[in-house]
Image (cartoon, rainbow, N blue to C red):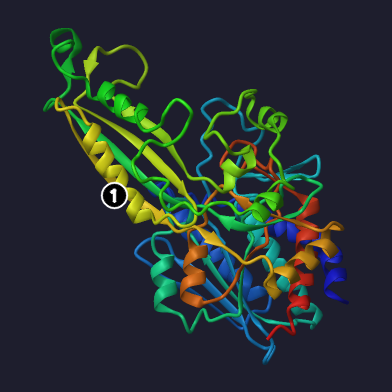
Amino acid sequence: MNPYEFIEANHNQFLEDLKDWLRIPSISTLSEHNADVRKAADWIKAHLDSIGLTRTEIFETPGHPLVYGEWLGAGNAPTVLIYGHYDVQPADDDEGLWQSDPFEPVVRDGNLYARGATDDKGQTFTQVKAIHSLLQSGQMPVNVKFILEGEEESGSNHIHTFVNEHPDLLATDVVVVSDTSFHAPDQPSIVYGLRGITYLEIEVRGPAQDLHSGMYGGIVHNPAQALVEILAALHDADGRVTVPGFYDKVRPLATDERAELAKTPFPPERLERETGLKTPWGEPGYELHERLGARPTLEINGIIGGRTGEGAKTVLPARALAKVSCRLVPDQDPKEIEALIAQHVASITPETVTSEVRVLHRGKWAIVEQDSPFMQAAARAFELGFGKRPVFTREGGSIPIVGTFQDQLNAPVILMGFGLPDDNLHGPNEKYALENFRKGMQTAIRFYEGISTLK
């Protein structure tokens, strides 16, 4: 039985296995789920053992563990390092939008619904089962390693150190990451560029303690008001970031690259369909698809301060806090951007309050050469697996480990994603198309067969 026949014969069991993994609420950002994150790591290690890998190991970190696995029986053939993450986002649902329990996977209309279905357990499992099918058929064309982390959704705080300290263990000819999405359901795409990120907190402090707003309002500068004044000054009326020097090192888009990106436009009707908004916003002079993947941003992710619970309380808060993130593009350096923001915030902070900017985490942008032999092999694999030549695109999100793999392992990274733009990753009713699960496994196998002589 060849690997493609093995997939068809075992697809239902593969789906049930994935459901078992998805039932584990491995939410890395919430400490009350630490045991669940560990359980998910143990589960995937045991599963890697069961599919025929010759070595699996859990590496402890100061945070959540890393899961490693390998099969190196292909001799001088290329080695592939497959990265994924087994932690998931919280499944908050204050508005009752989930149509089913996020941690009890269900199939509806050809989709598998669950938290982590596409980000990233489902896509990672697609690679796992592709390797399983190759091993069981006795037709494994490459050497393979896995490194799976449990902190991607909380900053990937420890995998970078692990990669730096274990270059021999992770040595590879190419890295494969399945954690991205197609541009459209009928148009496969390969992401060749990811934005970097820096995530900050901006805190404003005023009085020594909360005050009665009737007794002190009007004579004490409210820290919540001062904070929003500072935040409002971070953009101009057209949506450009006003931090001095913010755009200085942004690499301009070349004409041919703009033409390639134009093959995957982001029309206003898609914006309305996916967000409910009719009017776009953002930096002038660039199309929506360029703003999403090739231009930097500064976003306010949350504001905390004063009374936020039910009912009224006439408080003048002692402090207010904003969560702020920047998506960065070549050639912006996260540390430089952090310093520029801190300097600017200090310069516009009123004398009536104090401010502080703190860095929570950061990650580098990444660009993969489109004409590399591995990238072209991936394009052929997608064409065989999905019946259509993929387009090359840049994604607005960040996968910080990609830059570290490029720098430390000196290997190209292929972003072999199988998600769809409406999969609702990080949102309610997250899903993964079963057709993409099946075709994704087939595409991965085509890729490994296609690169077997590229060494």
In the image, 279 versus 387, the foreground residue is: 279
Q: Seen from this angle, which residue lies furthest left?
A: 208
Q: Residue furthest bottom?
A: 75
At x 33%, y 55%, the residue is 335
Residue matched to label 1: 339
Name the foreground residue: 226 vs 136. 226
Image position of 216 with respect to 34: above or below: above
| Place of residue 134 in the rendered image (x, y in percent of width and height, measured from the top left) | 76, 76
Above or below residue 382? Residue 169 is below
Q: Quadrant of the C terminus?
A: bottom right
Q: Where is residue 409 in the image (x, y as percent from the top left)?
A: 50, 77
The answer to which quarter of the image holds residue 236 is top left
- The percent coordinates of residue 325 (x first, y second) are 41, 43
Side (left or right) of 435 relative to 161: right
At 55% from the left edge and 55% from the top edge, which residue is drawn?
194
**Could one spot residue 103 in this view of the protein?**
no
Count of residue discs: 1
Q: Residue at the spot x=88%, y=77% of the render?
A: 1
